[in-house]
Amino acid sequence: MTRSFAGLITGRRTKYLIIVFWLIVVALAGPLAGKLTSVEDNEAKSWLPGSAESTQALDKQAEFASPDTIPAIVVYQRTSGLTPADQAKIAEDARQYAGLSELDGQITGPIPSDDGQAAQILVPLNLGPEGWDKAGTIVDSMKETATTNANGMNVHITGPAGTAADSAEAFEGIDSTLLFATIGVVVVILLFTYRSPILWLLPVISAGVALTTAQGVIYLLAKHAGLTVNAQSAGILTVLVFGAGTDYALLLVARYREELRRHHDRHEAMGVALHRAGPAIIASAATVAIGMICLLFAETNSTRGLGPVAAIGVVVALAVMLTLLPALLVTVGRWIFWPVRPKEGSAEPTATGVWAKIGNRIAQRPRTTWVTTSLVLAVLAIGIVQLDATGLTNKESFRGNPDSIVGEEVLAQHFPAGSGNPVVVISNAAQAPEVRAVLASTEGIDAASVPQPVVKGDVAYLEGTLTAPADSQAGYDTVDRVRDRVHDVSGADALVGGNTAINLDLQRAARHDRNLIIPIVLLVVLVILCLLLRAIVAPLVLVATVVLSFGAALGVSALVFKHLFGFGGADSSLPLFVFVFLVALGIDYNIFLMTRVREEAARHGTKRAALIGLAATGGVITSAGLVLAGTFAVLATLPLTAFAEIGFAVAFGVLLDTIVVRAVLVTSLNLDIGRHMWHPSRLAKVPDESPAEAAREPTEVPA
């Protein structure tokens, strides 16, 4: 099957049809890809767990106010005390805000602080369904009003609208920033890898076609099939398509160059390369795609939406790299490898390369090598105890001090810490007085802040101000207390929501998703490896090495986040995202290595094949790891802590997996376990040389 497919792709005439086909596809997908941001859903509900109490409360709140309405809090401060002129200025600003076309409800304030040094105005804004993008413009306009003739007063805009504006600014231009930075990283690494000023163009062009096509497909699904796409998943899509796609390109080109030394006709060489490397690349992409699809089991909408987005990107990248790239390579000919063109009959440089030498060193003491390496990784994994993945506060979410965060701190100095982020309770109207009394008497709620309930039909709306910061553990504890007490009110059917409850539910959903999805992904990866390698022992060993690599990467990342970068914590979804990316992507390199080892084991025995496999794949897998690590590291350029954490952890984990786990740990295990790796297949009966005997032979890379 792979031979006939390879013949179709590399045919002397059909190669042109393949190129024309992808030209048509990218011409159709290009305009759609440009519209992807228009269907991104960055509103609160798109990130929430669908069954959470805060989500249900948000739905009920729509009866009292539009779900698109969020408050902006304008904070004024003069540390020497507000003057009468300041107070008049603030009152005038409130009147101007009352004329905003986006106003939805009554303005509250000006509210002076008890110390006389500050005042606040609460402005409910209906930003419409495109609120994320619109928040910045409105907040800037309000800020201009507040700062005009302020005469030295400090003015800040905070609250949910202020935070939304700063978040929108942080994500502004994310697509172009990530795209150009990713392309830059890929080009530099490909130039270093190929040592050719021209060859890098074909993988980059192919990756660009893959990204455009994937974005076009995702746009159509988001527009017409209800797929949830947000700025986070769209950003990850860019680095994933370029990273994984370039990895597949590197592996195919390496095998093609190898076959060009054995075949006079380049079409025949590419056909053999596709036949030999294709199954491993397909298995690798299938592992990543199915691993991403496992995210559909998540409760959190944003995590669940990332699954199909990422899977589509990987599948499209695979299709492009196994069709368009081979067609382009055989069309342009051997000259594309200039200045070092592979000639028929020339020596294979990997036979005496650095990885062949490393393999020979490992072969001298394979058991000592894998035991020592495993212990070092296990020690690094201990750092996980330092990981505080309980979510990020608003302040911790940004790398820097945007205006909404400064305003939040000023607000906390002069008003109850939870001002502007009330706990919301929705109940049946008949029990509303009792619910109000319970809410007001709950520890952690400012009793004076609980007004009479607003009733519409048979539903009542209540809110209360937290005495602790809205995004603190004390605030979360108060939400739990409120829930326990109002749920006990018979017949109230009370639901507790608000921003603090939302963040709390997100944390718990992330914990649920992590505990559910990680075992599922491990099982999926194990099954794919068993089918690919037709063995049981090798897949179990490989999964164990990747899990150990993940633990070490997360442990080191936790220490770096806390002691080097000074991050206050980690996003609650970090462990799951890092696990899925590292296990799904990290197993790629083991697949590439082990399929080559299996290919050679039938002729040379497993221990000899382990050295041949390492020598043949070491350089290209290292380059692939550098590309993938570099593309994910690009995420750290964004001014958002969660992206920086994902970028660093995945980049470090990929490098660890590429250089240490795959090259050293897996190779030493192959050399120590030998033919038993393939139990119960027939390969388990092929006799082995000793590791030392295998290392004394030339590490030729046979045809």
Image (cartoon, helix red, strand yellow):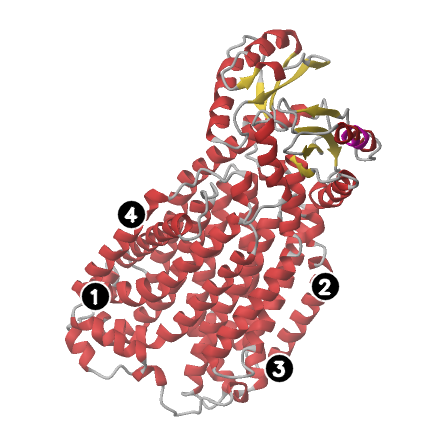
What crowding class fits label 1: few (fewer than 14 Cα within 10 Å), some (14-19), or many (20 or more)?
Answer: many
Relative image position of residue 310 (x, y in whole percent): 54, 54
Disc number lying in front (1 or 3):
1
Q: In which quarter of the image is the C terminus?
A: bottom left
Q: Is residue 312 visible?
A: no
Please give the range of residues in magenta: 89-93
Relative image position of residue 271 (x, y in whole percent): 48, 78
Residue 675's tag is 1
Tell me, yes or no, whether the highlighted magenta stretch contains residue 670. no
Q: Which of 45 and 323 is in front in this view?
A: 45
Whether 533 is drawn above or below 645: the answer is below
Callout 1, which amino acid? Answer: Arg
What crowding class fits label 4: few (fewer than 14 Cα within 10 Å), some (14-19), or many (20 or more)?
Answer: some
Which of the marked residues, 2 or 4, is nearer the chain's N terminus?
2
Q: Nearer the viewer, residue 14 or 441?
A: 441
Callout 4, which amino acid? Answer: Ile
Q: How many labels does the image show?
A: 4
Label 2 to label 1: alpha-carbon separation:
51 Å
Residue named by callout 3 = 13
What crowding class fits label 2: few (fewer than 14 Cα within 10 Å), some (14-19), or many (20 or more)?
Answer: some
Q: Are marks 2 and 3 in contact (CB under 8 Å)?
A: no
Whether 553 is drawn above or below 438: the answer is below
Label 4 to label 1: alpha-carbon separation:
33 Å
Residue named by callout 4 = 382
Label 2 to label 3: alpha-carbon separation:
24 Å
Q: Which of 338 and 448 is in front in this view?
A: 448
Label 3 to label 4: alpha-carbon separation:
57 Å
Residue named by callout 2 = 28
Relative image position of residue 342 (x, y in whole percent): 45, 88
